[in-house]
Structures are given as C-alpha cells and as structure tokens.
C-alpha cells in the first residue's frame, strides 16, 4: 500500500476515536502490551516524559520538546489528534515521521494488527515507540490520548509524569466528577517516578497526593512552586499555567542528572516553540484586518478562558465560526459564548460532527444568533466576506473545525 492507501486502511478498518467516538474506546491495555512485546518492547529503549491532563497537554508537550531541542537533544514528540496529516502525531525535532516509515511499518505488521484487531490508536502508539527507538532519540515527550490509566501510552516508565489539570471532559469514559477523572489521569503515576501537577482543586489534590504516596512518587504542584515566567510564542491566556508546569518539569528533569537544561534554553524554547515544533491552533492569529483567531479549545474549562480573552480584543463586530462534535454537552458550553457576535454554524467534516442545524437551534435558545452553512470552509469564507477590517473573526468549538482552516 502507498501512503494514502495505508492511511485510509488505518482510518477505515479499525476503531478510531477521532471519527467514531465511544465505539473506539478500549478499557484495556492487553492489546498494547501484546503489540509492544511483539515489537520487542521499543518503549523500554527510550527515555520519556509522560503528559496527561484535560487541557493544555498538547501545548505543554510542545513547549517541553522545544526547550529540550534548544538544549541540543534529539527529541521525539508524540501527540494527538492531528490537524492536517496523520504524520503530525509523530515527530523528531519538529520533523514529521516520513511517509515511507509509516507505510513500511504498517505493511510489515499488518497481518499481526488484523489478527489481533488492534485499534487505530494502539497501532499508532506502537509505531511511535518503534520509530523513536529506531531513530535513537535522547528523550521522547509522550502525550496521553485520553484519560491516563488505560490509555495505550501508559506502558512506559517515564523519567517524570505530568498532569496539567483536571476538568470535565470525556465524562462518558472517565467519570462525571473531578475526583473520578483525576483518578484516571493519576493512573500514569508510577512507582518512584516524580510527578508534576499543573493546576489542582482541593478535590483533585487529594487524589494526586494519595496516588503519589502509594507509589512513593515525589509530587510537585507547579502552581505553588513556580513564580518566574518568560514570554512565549504561545499567547493564549491559558498558557500561563502550562508554562509553570513546563518549568517545574524541566527542574525535575535537571535533577535526574540525565540532562543539562539552562534558563536560556527555557527562554528560547518558549519563544521559538512554533518554529521548533510546528504547533498550530492555539490562539493562532491567521491574519489581520480583519483579525482572524482560531483555537482548539472545546470543553468548558478551555472555552471559558478563551472566550474571556476574546472579549478583550478590540472590534467593531465579532464573528464566530462555530462547530462541535456530537458528544458535547451544549447546555454547559453554550452559556460561555458571547451574545454580541454574529454566528456561522457549521459541522466539522468527520462522522462525529454535530449537525449544524441542531447546533443553531440549540444556540438560539442561549441568545446566540446566526446562519447555518454547509461546511466549515463555507462558513469561514462567509465570515471573511461579511467582516470589515476592524472586526474580529473567531473560529473554534472543536479541534476538527480548526483543522479545516489552518
């Protein structure tokens, strides 16, 4: 199979959360452990940092990778989902894995994948560990897909575990309280492996502290320990928390004696993160006059911060291109959106996308008024056509909406 055929086979033959949602979620690590053994346990041959959390784990992972790259290390970076191309998920020093490597790996092991009915995510995790070990990275930043305890990435023993924060998202899988979700994320805490927690609440702190004590893991609450901050190319208001988490994680990495990372490396990593890792969709300004901002925030915690930041912008009229996936609790997120905007309702082009007419009807009940468009691109083009140069256009509601316009 060539690259396009390989990717289509992966997307179509096997459960993929990005497209299907609930049916693709597996509550078991058996397949991942089986695959790792079959591949010769490549995850044991790489040093890793494991990053979980409801929000900010992507930004945190990219910032950590950028700083380590600035310090001269060969850095693997595994994240999900991708925006444009599957290969974005697996990078070394900011460069996507090659099409050839993806094809060769999938073709070589296809019989095994099919025989054991491996999921899209399980295969991808196997590919990432195999690639990083094969390419002899100095360290790999591994972002959890969802949750932690039962996530396919949770077969590693990292140098440090990181939990950015806890919010209510993916409640149908992880539980419907902060404590239940915190327990799932805390599942990445390993015996004698230090853990950094970004933000916490009294309820979640209790969960983290108990799990760390059980595993004899030193725990660091970054928000209580880090007071310095450096400017960053990531300018979303929410990045202030991610930066603290990253700086505390770097301190822990330095303390292992495995790395030498200076404050200069941290400063430059923050400033050069976009060039070094090619992260997209985090309070990204796509153009000026009219100013267009896109952001992948998609749950109550992320959207609350982003909507507050949006209202600080100077504009004559605010235009919001909005689409969501079908497992969102609209009654939670709709009140966060401003009534002083013209809305352009659309459906992201994935099976999980929520019908735009249903979104419009629900939104109108919250005083959010606008038209329905046949596609994200159509909605975006209409917003651009309607906006004057002193207006602001915001595009978001889902990672998959942003993916169609960046």
Image: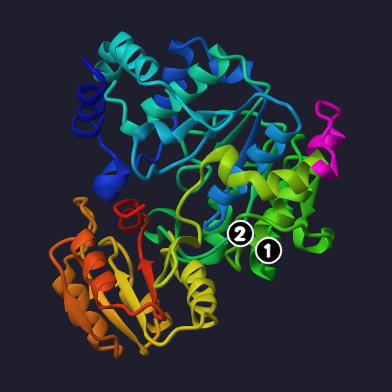
Q: Position of residue 283 (x, y in %)?
A: 50, 62
Q: Residue at x 40, y 85 (%)?
A: 338
Let me know if residue 258 is in the magenta part.
yes
Using residue 312 as the reference point, say whether residue 332 is left or right of it: left
Determine whether the residue tagged by mark 1 lies in a helix, strand or loop.
helix
Q: Residues within 10 Å of mark 2 (few under 14, many from 20)?
A: many
Q: Residue at x 26, y 37 (%)?
A: 15
- Whether residue 8 appears in this view of the structure is yes
Let me know if residue 243 is in the magenta part.
no
Q: Position of residue 109 (x, y in %)?
A: 32, 12
Determine whether the residue tagged by mark 2 lies in a helix, strand or loop.
loop
Please determine whether, in this image, residue 284 is positioned above or below residue 142: below
Using residue 44 as the reference point, say whether residue 97 is left or right of it: left
CB of mark 1 within 8 Å of CB of mark 2? no
> Which colour scheme appears in the figure?
rainbow
| Quadrant housing residue 402 | bottom left
Using residue 265 as the reference point, say whether residue 330 is left or right of it: left
Which numbered marker is on residue 165?
A: 2
Which numbered marker is on residue 240?
A: 1
Q: Nearer the viewer, mark 1 or mark 2?
A: 1
Q: Residues within 10 Å of mark 1 (few under 14, many from 20)?
A: some
Q: Position of residue 348 (x, y in %)?
A: 24, 57
Which numbered marker is on residue 71?
A: none
Question: The magenta stretch spans which residues?
Answer: 253-264
In front of the other: 174 or 128: 128
In front of the other: 342 or 117: 342
- Whether residue 199 appears in this view of the structure is no
């Amino acid at each position: 199979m060539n690259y396009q055929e390989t990717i289509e086979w992966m997307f179509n033959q096997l459960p993929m959360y990005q497209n299907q949602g609930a049916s693709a979620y597996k509550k078991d690590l058996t397949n991942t452990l089986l695959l790792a053994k079959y591949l010769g346990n490549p995850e044991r041959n790489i040093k890793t940092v494991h990053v979980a959390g409801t929000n900010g784990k992507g930004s945190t992972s990219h910032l950590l990778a950028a700083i380590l790259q600035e310090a001269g290390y060969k850095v693997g970076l595994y994240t999900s989902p991708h925006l444009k191309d599957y290969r974005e998920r697996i990078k070394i020093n900011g460069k996507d894995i090659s099409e050839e490597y993806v094809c060769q790996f999938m073709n070589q092991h296809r019989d095994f994948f099919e025989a054991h009915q491996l999921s899209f995510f399980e295969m991808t995790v196997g590919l990432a560990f195999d690639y990083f070990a094969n390419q002899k990275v100095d360290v790999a930043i591994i972002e959890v897909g969802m949750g932690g305890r039962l996530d396919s990435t949770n077969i590693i023993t990292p140098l440090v575990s990181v939990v950015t924060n806890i919010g209510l998202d993916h409640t149908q899988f992880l539980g419907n309280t902060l404590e239940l979700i915190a327990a799932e994320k805390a599942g990445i805490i390993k015996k004698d492996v230090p853990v950094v927690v970004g933000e916490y609440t009294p309820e979640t702190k209790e969960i983290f502290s108990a799990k760390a004590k059980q595993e004899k893991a030193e725990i660091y609450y970054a928000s209580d320990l880090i007071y310095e901050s450096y400017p960053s190319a990531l300018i979303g208001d929410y990045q202030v928390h991610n930066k603290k988490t990253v700086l505390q994680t770097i301190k822990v990495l330095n303390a292992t004696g495995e790395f030498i990372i200076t404050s200069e490396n941290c400063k430059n990593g923050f400033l050069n993160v976009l060039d070094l890792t090619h992260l997209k969709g985090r309070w990204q300004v796509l153009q000026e006059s009219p100013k267009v901002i896109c952001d992948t925030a998609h749950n109550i915690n992320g959207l609350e911060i982003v909507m507050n930041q949006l209202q600080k912008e100077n504009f004559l009229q605010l235009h919001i291109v909005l689409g969501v996936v079908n497992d969102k609790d609209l009654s939670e997120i709709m009140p966060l959106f401003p009534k002083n905007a013209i809305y352009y309702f659309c459906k992201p082009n994935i099976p999980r996308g929520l019908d735009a007419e249903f979104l419009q009807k629900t939104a109108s009940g919250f005083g959010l008024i606008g038209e329905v468009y046949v596609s994200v691109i159509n909605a975006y083009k209409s917003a651009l056509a309607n906006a004057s140069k002193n207006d602001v256009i915001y595009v978001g509601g889902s990672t998959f909406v942003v993916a169609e316009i960046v």
